[in-house]
Image (cartoon, helix red, strand yellow):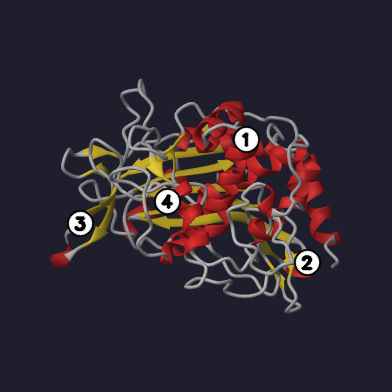
Amino acid sequence: MRHSSIILAITCLFLLICVPIKADELPANSPLVRAIDAVIEQQHISADVPGLALCVIQPGHWTFKKGYGLANIAQQIPITQHTLLEIASVSKTFTATAILTLHERGKLSIHDDIRKFIPELPDYRPGHPIHIADLLHHVSGIPSYLSFENVPSANQDFWINADYVKAFGTQLQEHPLDFQTGQKYEYNNTNYLLLAVIVERVSRQFFGAFMREHIFHPAGMKNTFVYERPDAVPKGLPKNCHCAIGYEKGKKNTWRETWGTRPDRQETMLTVGDGAIWTNLEDMAHWDAALRHHKLLKPETMQLALTPSKTRDDKTNNYGLGWSIYPGENGKLNGFGHDGSWGGFNTSYYRYVAANRTTIVLSNRGGFDTDKFWYALNNAIEKHSPENKK
């Protein structure tokens, strides 16, 4: 594999942004804010329907953080930059960071056999171990846990990761490997559920506790949490940090609730690692800064995370260690990030490398097309960005 051009681009980017630079909030009446508001209006997001929280960071120039629409329709609670939303599969970038943190500390290696930590898993192909890196790259071939049926629960009314770990052994006949490990790339939530189990067993902490101590707090994410149990919403959250409800379009163009935390809703699927992180714009801006300033991972580890994998079908897959990678012309890195969708929540974190700009979208309206929205938003930014007017 030849990834020298991509790694060189990443290295140059990190060298340019290794020193923290303050960026000012855009004035509410600025041309760019008005342009962004117009893009939101074009998405038919008004003050009385589910909406989104949007953050755009242009380091050294400006930041934009604003909420649109409602976090909770019944209670008429608006979305703000403090509203907590489920970020769905964007959580995978955090899970991967946790694994890479343990890798850096020598607590595990991404080349370890996963059965070293989860011996209950079947030995699917004796003599051909599945490695942690295979989970990270989505090339393991392990079947989707979401397709399992009649999984016993250790709790009365909800399921957690441990319940599904046991099910892999008992349902081996019904759910063998989908394909030989490393044969191809196939995105699968199971990979990151198992990574969360590995984090717990290596650290001897619950996944949420490890993330809070070693990822969230070091990054400055004070109000972010993992919804791994019904009582997992932290006590003493600031009054403005309401947990949003996820919505899907129902009949007659109405919105119906589909996901949320207690006391608003009582969910039964509380698996983590592949999702289940709740956060807000304030904390996601801190996450972006932590990545830029190497607070969590060494530059060389981040370079590794942003390197594509190559499978036995001779395809280069633009998914690194927890990150979707977007190559540009001549092999250069155009951007990286992750999308997520679950229970009416649609989320996106995207670092546009060429422009050195980050866009974060946290939405609670099911079916919202974050990709289409990003292109419209980016066009507005390119046209109205303050630094382009100088």
Q: Nearer the viewer, mark 4 or mark 2?
A: 2
Quadrant for residue 318, please give it. Answer: bottom right
Furthest residue in direction left, as rendered:
252
The residue pinned by badge 3 equals 255
Q: Amino acid at mark 3?
A: Trp
The residue pinned by badge 1 equals 289
Cα–Cα gap, marks 3 and 4: 27 Å
The residue pinned by badge 2 equals 331
Left/right placement of residue 253 relative to residue 293 reads left
Please name whichever residue, 368 or 358, is drawn nearer the observer in this view of the structure. Answer: 368
Residue 31 in view, yes or no? no
Cα–Cα gap, marks 1 and 3: 35 Å
Q: Position of residue 214 (x, y in %)?
A: 61, 30
Q: Amino acid at mark 1?
A: Ala
Quadrant for residue 147, please give it. Answer: bottom left
Please name whichever residue, 359 or 213, is drawn nearer the observer in this view of the structure. Answer: 213
